[in-house]
Amino acid sequence: MSRYKTMFASLREKKQGAFIPFVMLGDPDETSSLEILHSFVEGGADALELGIPFSDPVADGPTIQAAALRALSNGMTPKKAFEILRKFRETNSITPIGLLVYANLVVQGENDAFFEQAKAAGVDSVLVADIPSKEAAPFCESAKKSGIDPVLIAAPNSSDDQLKMIAELSSGYTYVVSRAGVTGAETKAEMKHGQLIEKLKDFGAPPPVLGFGISSPEQVREALESGAVGAISGSAIVKLIASTAPEKRNETILQFIRGMKAETQLS
Amino acid sequence: MKTENEGWFGSFGGCYVPEILLPALEQLSNAFATARQDPEFQKELSDLLAEYAGRPTPLYLCRQIGPDTGTRLYLKREDLVHGGAHKTNQVLGQALLAKRLGKTRLIAETGAGQHGVATALVGALFGLKTRIYMGAKDVARQRLNVFRMELMGAEVVPVECGAKTLKDAINEALRDWAASYTDTHYMLGTAAGPHPFPLMVREFQRVIGDEAREQILAREGRLPDSALACVGGGSNAIGLFTAFVPDKEVALIGVEPAGKGLHTGEHGMTLQAGRPGILHGSKTFILQDEHGQIVESHSISAGLDYPGVGPEHAHLQATGRAKYVGVTDDEAVAAFRRLSACEGIIPALESAHALAYAFKLMERGEGGEVMLLNLSGRGDKDVRQIADYMGVSLEGKA
């Protein structure tokens, strides 16, 4: 069974939703990145969603753009990002790891090279922010061939045809974006996606996890109450990392994750 | 194999955008497909092109340049289009589509400001609220164009993220559109980006080559030996080439900015020095490092300063139908001065790249008898920069 399936099954038993924090690998630097991942897990994160920095992140708001630039200026590369994950896997073999990347990083090298490297580093899923359902078939095929779950995004304006395509092509989980726009805590999540989640269920899509604009424990609860099986929080955490002194960073992260995770108990 | 109507030119093109933008692009694609077949739309567009933009533009045979080399050099005078460049052709088409779709707001990116000016002008003409994204560095070096846009009622937003140039302005426009697609049309400025932009912009720009082909047949009774145009994103070049693609005897030559020279790394020769990748919505040639991070381009001409290129040019290069060459900053400036001095026409620095290559061919005796060149814009906007380049001060003496 895949790490995601094991995680969702175990959470179902505990009557909990998943809390999934996002961070940019290499932000602020390689060593801190590894510590941050371990802090996430220690704080109660059920899975990790991790970015590899790209120079032109069109789906990201200012907070995550800035994180990508910080990581890039510190010399982060896909190869080094995979190295961080390999080190993480030396002591953690159960937490599912999802990558959130951009297409131009995925098409480098031979056909399946990126997915194979990801698999070897212990990655479970890959979401490519600028590959929509319409263009996703070859990427999903390639990912699956390497044993990686291809994750697609379902949006509030997605048509039934798009949602069916997402159900057919993706695996692991479905990243449901809570609102229009780009990533960021500047614009709050909207919580009226019950219908979207129902449709995804009807079409047999992988479990829906809500993201974009989730920055408080109350929003985690609202996300789960709207029918999602998990919530992803990114910009709020990235901001925390950027604004906290290095010696206090891990403790601050730990507290934040604990607060978010506490709201995932359903009854 | 997928067709161009589905967004593919051979193995280049596609629609690589965040999922949230797919419905807006599909809506645009359908509206464009309908409009192409709709005589009413075509009439409205051709009336605007005639009465507002000043089409057809003349085809001018150079009098001073050429006779001694045995080449007749024809310039397609897109510099005379209202607004000062070919950009106006396609913004009129897109604005009509935006109106049909009930959009009330336009957003656009601009590098040097020409496409920003063109968008501002149709925004005023059609009463659409207009916001232009422009890299903060470009805002600083193109004050005059910023003011022109503002005079026509557009809001110019300096983009402070990334490299603060054209590619970042495109990123920011895409981010805006991801939140605003319901009432906003993204007026992309060149034949690049996600489907349907490369196809749609080409179709709105092909009037350049369609007119030129007819004009040159009327004047010469034959087709030209070659057709030349500069290539940044590639809209003026694809606009010229399209009519001639089936005419195998016409050599199609796209001129990219070699900047300070290929060996310096400071250039914008995407097709010649880049490699395939995915940027701003399409699979095409891109200037990038070994990891796939986008690299900054360089050119004295801001309109050619872009690390990507329209996917159809990547395809025309791959099939060998078109050839792409480079011209340095210095060569472009020399050509700029030569056309000004010899023909009384001040060309845009972008177009001066195509001119420089034409002059080179003529000097080598490889120009053929009849050469056609797209003079894509006028050079008034570049005069200050050329003065700086020549070390001439334009400030009055105290």
Image (spheres, rainbow, N blue to C red):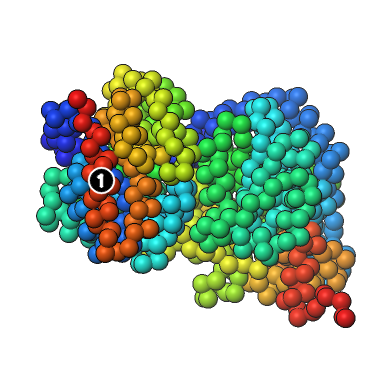
Identify the residue position indicated by label 1 in the image: A257
Snapshot quadrant of residue B34: top right
**SS class, disc 1:** helix
Residue at image x 52%, y 57%?
B161
What subunit carries mark 1? A
Within 10 angstroms of label 1, few (less than 14), some, or many (20 or more) residues? many
- Spot occupied by residue A166 in the image (x, y as percentages of width and height): 35, 30
B157 left or right, relative to B195: right
Q: Taking A190 as reference, is B208 left or right?
A: right
Q: Residue at x 66, y 60 (%)?
A: B139
Residue at 57% in and 30% down: B182
| Residue B42 locus on image (x, y percent) | 75, 30
Against A194, residue A5 (above or below) is below
User: In the image, what residue type sits under mark 1?
Assistant: Ile
Considering depth in this image, is A34 or B263 the residue closer to the camera?
Answer: A34
Q: Is residue A84 at all visible to an observer of this figure? A: yes
In the rendered image, the quadrant that contains the C terminus of chain B is bottom right
